Image (spheres, rainbow, N blue to C red):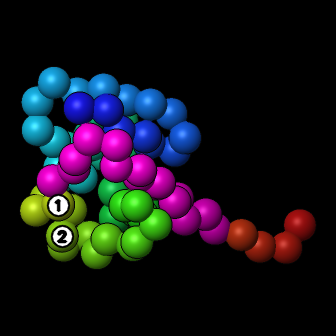
């Protein structure tokens, strides 16, 4: 199965869900990441039940704190 994660092609021979994908991509704080699947946001409580399919496009959007300099 070929998927695109943050504009990079990744290939997996076994089924994978969003939780597994976050682990395989070494995301340290998954609760601080918004995930888009084919342009639609996925709720964090749905990560483990959202199985990926060939040619899915996933974007990890990381929250960053900001402030004045």
- Please state the horizontal and vertical placement of residue 49, each as a whole percent of the image: 10, 62
Quadrant (top left/top right/bottom left/bottom right) for the N terminus: top left
Contact flag, marks 1 and 2 (Cβ < 8 Å)? yes
Please report the residue visible at 26 percent of the width from the left and 70 percent of the height from the top.
44
- Please state the horizontal and vertical placement of residue 43, each as a whole percent of the image: 28, 75
Q: Which residue is mark 2?
A: 46
Please report the residue visible at 71 percent of the width from the left and 69 percent of the height from the top.
66
Q: Which residue is mark 1?
A: 50
Which labelled disc corresponds to residue 25?
none
- Please state the horizontal and vertical placement of residue 27, each as a whole percent of the image: 38, 44
Relative to residue 59, is residue 14 depicted above or below?
A: above
- Please state the horizontal and vertical placement of residue 9, each as a whole percent of the image: 44, 31
Relative to residue 2, is residue 16 depicted above or below?
A: below
Magenta stretch: dominant SS? loop
| 53 or 63, nearer to the observer | 53
Relative to residue 31, is residue 59 depicted above or below?
A: above
Is residue 60 shown in magenta? yes
| 14 or 64, nearer to the observer | 14
> Dot 1 surroundings within 10 Å: few (below 14), some, or many (20 or more)?
some
Q: Is residue 58 left or right of residue 18?
A: right
Label 2: which secondary element: helix
Label 1: which secondary element: loop
Identify the magenta region: 51-65
Q: Is residue 9 left or right of residue 23?
A: right
Quadrant (top left/top right/bottom left/bottom right) for the C terminus: bottom right
Q: CA distance from mark 1 to mark 2?
A: 6 Å
Please report the residue visible at 43 percent of the width from the left and 40 percent of the height from the top.
4
């Amino acid at each position: 199965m070929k998927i695109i994660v943050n504009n990079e092609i990744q290939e997996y021979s076994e089924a994978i869900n969003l939780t597994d994908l976050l682990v395989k991509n070494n995301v340290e704080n998954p609760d601080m990441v918004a995930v888009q699947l084919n342009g639609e946001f996925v709720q964090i409580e749905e990560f483990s039940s959202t199985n990926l399919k060939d040619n899915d496009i996933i974007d990890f959007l990381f929250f960053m704190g900001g402030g004045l300099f």
